[in-house]
Amino acid sequence: MHPDRTASLTFTGELDTVSTPVAWTALETELAGSNVSRLEVDLRQLASCDSAGLALLYYISMGRMTPGATVALAGLNPELQPLLASFSTEDFEALQEHEPVCPSFVDEVGTATWSWLTDLRQQVEFIGEVTRGVITGLLHPRQMRWKEVLRIFETAGVNALPVVSLLTFLVGMVIAFESAQPLAELGAQVFVANTLGLVMSRELGPVMAAIMLASRSGSAFAAELGTMKVNEELNALKTMGLSSVQFLVVQRVVAGILLTPVLTIFAMYAGLVGGIPVLLGLGFPLRVVLNQIEISLHFGDLAEGLSKSIVFGAIVSSVSCLRGLQTGEGPRAVGESTTRSVVSSILLIIIADVIIAAVTYNLRK
Amino acid sequence: MSEPAKILIEARDLTVGYGDRLILEQINFQVHRGEVFAILGASGAGKSTLLKHLIGLHEPMQGDVLISGESLVQAEGEERLRILRKFGVLYQGGALFGSLTAVENVRLPLDEFTDLSELAKDLIALSKLRLVGLEAAATKLPADLSGGMQKRAAIARAIVMDPCVLFLDEPSAGLDPITSAGLDALIRELARGLGITFVMVTHELASIYAVADRVVVLDPKTRRIVAEGAPLWLREHATQPWVRQFLNRGVA
């Protein structure tokens, strides 16, 4: 720095995205509190300069590193002048001033309540529309697209059998292991088979099958219908005078109602088969195990499990389709509706399960 | 300082396709530094396929793509990344990230590939948005921008790392004629003002006559380049009648 508080700065070599951050920090440290009144920046020896370098030069030229000083740039390549001219302090300040609008607590509560009520209304309307569609389809079977029902039955049902069977087989083993110890303390280890039979037929068979249906096929329904909405295929149906519920949803709901009991039967059997090796390992002969299961299981238990599965199938398929049809706009919309379909389905399965359990308990009394 | 090489991109004996399906064969052309080069052809001629091979999204069946004399096909790892950073790409739909604002979209490559301060990154991103005339829409989400504005924001993102070449895939697709003409003007401005080389795939003749210095025409029947030259010259002098007819569509 000269005695008249004039300083000169010479740039050499390349000023790019690699060298600029280093130069920026070094200059800020060097010039901080330097009390310069005029800064002369010599750029004649600058071999190359990209946008990062120009950002630094702009920042210096605006006097941000030397407050109060006049800054003069000399020797900048004329080709870079238009790029340097594109930098703007006003744009930067406008960006800094921009703060995302943060809704108040009352706004948020109001919006959430309104959204919940709207969703509830849509669900009620949807249930009515689906019920009417299913009844119409059953009364006029020729109007039903049975090929589509079969395709969904295969992809959502038959193709899901291995994974549902494996899952419930393993759950059956876990239940057998976990119940063996407490029942052994009571001297009733043989009743592990009875427990397993009741649990798998009344509760876990239908629930596990429904949860697998929700996570595997329900999410696929929501994603498929959501993508169709994003691609304006649903609008195309509407303009052709076709109901998206009648054309797309009813088939899925009918397939869901038909396939869930089948999946549930497989789940029940796989769970029982999973528990048998554990019981054999505990020293019970196969004949005794099968006998205990036979004694404990009644037709009512199977009927309860299967009736639950029909309700669960209707819930999963219709809720998933509803979430698909409710898909919004933007790239995240399909993902969001898929997530909502799985969460809503599982929640409603459990709620329905509690209601059915309470009803059947009172009926058995 | 040495003079940069005149040839920036070279397709050398390029044969491309998907699986066993051959789309184009023996494609040869050179793109010179600073020019606006267009790849032209009817629907299904393989324009977008060729572009995808030029930017390294797919491996060619045969041949090579050279960017500043370096092979993109043979390059691997860091070397390939270094070559990829030499160019930017504008996809048909803009491909802006919907959850980020315009300025955040433009800043993204700087966030990922540089150690610049937040302030420097904001300054650079805003300067690019100003270059494309979108400084007032910096804080808007892509969903709040019109189709033309989305394309402009995508161009700003594509040039934020100072590429020497910009590939454009159907830049006018889905735009009305006025917005499309505005985009053409921007391309011309960036090419003339900043010296960016453009390689564009399009079948919009108005855009080609407005911005392109040179074009190659792809023939879906022979799967080869059938004509190469300045668009106005080709319109009158192309050897194949269908090329002349193609280039004369809509010309009174």
Image (cartoon, rainbow, N blue to C red):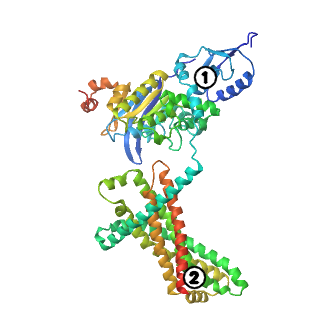
Left or right, A4 with respect to B240, comes to right
Left or right: where A174 falls relative to A85:
right
**Mark nearer the N terminus (2 vs 1):** 1
Under circle 1, the secondary element is helix
Q: Are marks 2 and 1 in contact (CB under 8 Å)?
A: no
Residue A278 in picture, x, y percent from top left = 64, 79
In which image quadrant can residue A23 be found?
Answer: top right
Q: Quadrant of residue B240?
A: top left
Q: Position of residue A293 (x, y in %)?
A: 57, 86
**What chain does mark 2 sit on?**
A
Res. A198 mark:
2
Answer few, some or many: residues within 10 Å of disc 1's Cα (few below 14, many 20 plus, some between 14 and 19): many
Relative depth, front residue between B219 and A205: A205
Residue A58 is labelled as: 1
Amino acid tagged 1: Tyr
Q: Tell me, yes or no, if residue B63 can be seen here.
A: no
